[in-house]
């Protein structure tokens, strides 16, 4: 298969913190998987976007969801996505800075495809 025929993985990052967006973008760029990142910073827009209110943008192959969002909390967004028969098919990984929240989400939502702490980086002094 030629490189031209390889379709990038469509990743939807739901994150309002610009530093976390930048770090996630860097991590995805450093990986060896071709991807295209779309970022939404407001939880209220996510479900509308996924249901097609996105001006022809492709449906994501993966959603990375921060739990602490303006507009709608990430737990509400998660419930909406996993409660929709069509949207629940999209793999979803929850991102949060809280180790306790990662554990809680993983236990509480058996249909979450993954959960992890948000990416962090130590900045040299």
Image (cartoon, grey):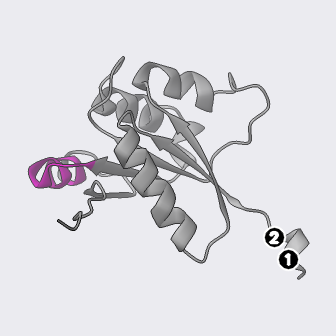
Residue name at image x 46 percent, y 65 percent: 27
Nearer-the-camera pick, 85 or 118: 118
Q: CA distance from mark 2 to mark 1?
A: 5 Å
Rendered position, 92 above or below 73: below
Please rate how many residues cluster around mark 2, counting C-alpha atoms within 10 Å: few if below 14, some from 14 to 19, many from 20.
Answer: few
Classify residue 109 as left or right of residue 52: left
Indicate the position of residue 37 as horizontal and vertical percent values. 60, 50
Residue 88 lies left or right of residue 38; in this view the side is left
Q: Position of residue 65 (x, y in %)?
A: 39, 43
- Report the front residue among 31 and 100: 31
Residue 35 is a magenta residue: no
At mark 2, the secondary structure is loop
Q: Looking at the picture, does residue 47 appear above or below residue 100?
A: above
Instruction: Identify the residue at image location x=50%, y=54%.
Output: 91
For residue 99: magenta?
yes
The residue singled out by tag 2 in the image is 6
Q: Secondary structure at mark 1?
A: helix
Residue farthest toward the front in the current orientation of the protein: 125
Q: Residues within 10 Å of mark 1 (few under 14, many from 20)?
A: few
Give the labeled residue for mark 1: 3
Give the extent of the magenta segment: 96-106
Residue appearing at x 28%, y 54% in the figure: 118
Q: Is 68 displayed left or right of 15 in the figure? A: left
Question: Tags 2 and 1 in contact by the CB under 8 Å rule?
Answer: yes
Residue 64 sits above or below residue 7 on the image = above
Q: In the rendered image, is residue 93 in sight? A: yes
* Side of 29 where 66 appears, left or right: left
């Amino acid at each position: 298969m030629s490189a031209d025929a390889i379709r990038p993985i469509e990743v939807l990052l739901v994150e309002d913190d610009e530093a976390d967006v930048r770090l996630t973008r860097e991590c995805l760029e450093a990986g060896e998987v071709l991807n295209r990142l779309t970022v939404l910073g407001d939880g209220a827009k996510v479900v509308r976007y996924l249901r097609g209110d996105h001006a022809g943008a492709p449906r994501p192959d993966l959603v990375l969801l921060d739990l602490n969002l303006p507009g709608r909390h990430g737990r509400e967004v998660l419930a909406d996505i996993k409660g929709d028969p069509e949207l629940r098919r999209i793999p979803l990984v929850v991102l949060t800075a809280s180790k306790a929240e990662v554990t809680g989400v993983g236990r509480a939502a058996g249909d979450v495809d993954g959960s992890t702490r948000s990416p962090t980086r130590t900045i040299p002094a």
